[in-house]
Amino acid sequence: MSENAAFSKRVEEEGIIFIGPKHYSIAAMGDKIESKKLAGAAGVNCIPGVNDAIESAEKAVEIAQGIGYPVMIKASAGGGGKGLRVAFNDKEALEGFTSCRNEARNSFGDDRVFIEKFVEEPRHIEIQLVGDSHGNVVYLNERECSIQRRHQKVIEEAPSPFISDATRKAMGEQAVALAKAVKYQSAGTVEFVVGKDQSFYFLEMNTRLQVEHPVTECITGLDLVELMIRVAAGEKLPIEQKTCSAMAGRWSAASMRKTRSAVFFLRPDASCAFSRPRKRCLRRTPRSSWACGSTPACRTAARFRCITTR
């Protein structure tokens, strides 16, 4: 039901309040090509590239040569690491376009593909925000999710140990500008890729409450679900930007399951948040991962031995 513009619109047409963003905001941000165009118009930094659907592999190579390698070939409807290829030369661009397009068609029913510059030594940092129906939007600082496998997040940390206060402020302000441009209400996340020089570029906007949201709740002391309900009821946000300060760092770990072939896969249903280590301890519980079973999320995690804190 999340990020489904048609569902949100139908709920509203039936006279039911949808606890989440309006259908037009979901639709505007749901298409990666169109969302990048909207972001550029709102003054948000965008990665150099061609944000129009590319029709052939030969055209993809031509565009890649113009941008300069390495480039990233991406599906417009992609997500979760699907429909994504990195090319360092013409051969990889040719093959990557074809495989990316086929994967996008099979996975999303949409084979539109675009190309943008690949940011080397990137960090993946997302800005949590919340807006109301009165035009107010605040950003609740960032979560860094650079530790990934197969383009799937493994660890989230907040605040980011990498970016400066000035970069944090600039990213937050651009996220708010984009949210206001699409009249965003409810909780959402704007994702950025950040270069080693702290230059940052818009990736996408998730028009939903992400599973990692407890990390932000830990550093701000806010209940994001409560804020979503209050916003849906027509209330103004009870917070202002100047009051949204971050506390000590928190982590969220997506637990992983080891297969017989020694390959790890993410368990999206198992997530937990905990404070920075103060005392090391080695624990083994029947069903624990990155924490020692003190929360429901931790207790549902995969079985493996780990070092954690309490």
Image (cartoon, grey):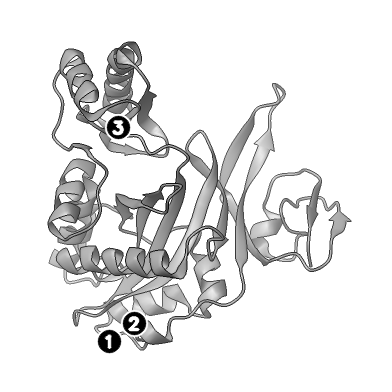
Q: Is residue 77 left or right of residue 82?
A: left
Q: In what element is the residue under mark 2? A: helix
Specify the amino acid type for callout 2: Arg
Farthest residue, direction top: 91
Residue 118's mark? none
Q: Which residue is mark 2?
A: 230
Q: Amino acid at mark 3?
A: Lys
Amino acid at the residue labelled 1: Glu
Mark closest to the chain's N terminus, 2 or 1: 2
Real-space Cα separation, disc 2 to disc 1, in angstroms: 5 Å
Q: Nearer the viewer, residue 53 or 200?
A: 200
Residue under the image location 47 percent in, 37 percent down: 151
Which residue is label 3 attached to? 74
Q: CA distance from mark 1 to mark 3?
A: 38 Å
Of 153 and 11, the residue lying toward us: 153
- Tell me which corner region of the image, top left, top right, bottom left or bottom right, holds residue 17: bottom left
| Quadrant position of residue 278 | bottom right
Q: Are marks 3 and 2 in contact (CB under 8 Å)?
A: no
Q: Residues within 10 Å of mark 3 (few under 14, many from 20)?
A: many
Please rate how many residues cluster around mark 1, counting C-alpha atoms within 10 Å: few if below 14, some from 14 to 19, many from 20.
some
Does residue 310 sit above or below 292 in this rendering? below
For this rendering, which residue is in front, 285 or 49?
A: 49
- Residue under label 1: 235
In the rendered view of the protein, which quadrant contains the N terminus?
Answer: bottom left
Label pair 2/1, CB-CB below 8 angstroms:
yes
Dividing the picture into quadrants, the one containing residue 22 is bottom left
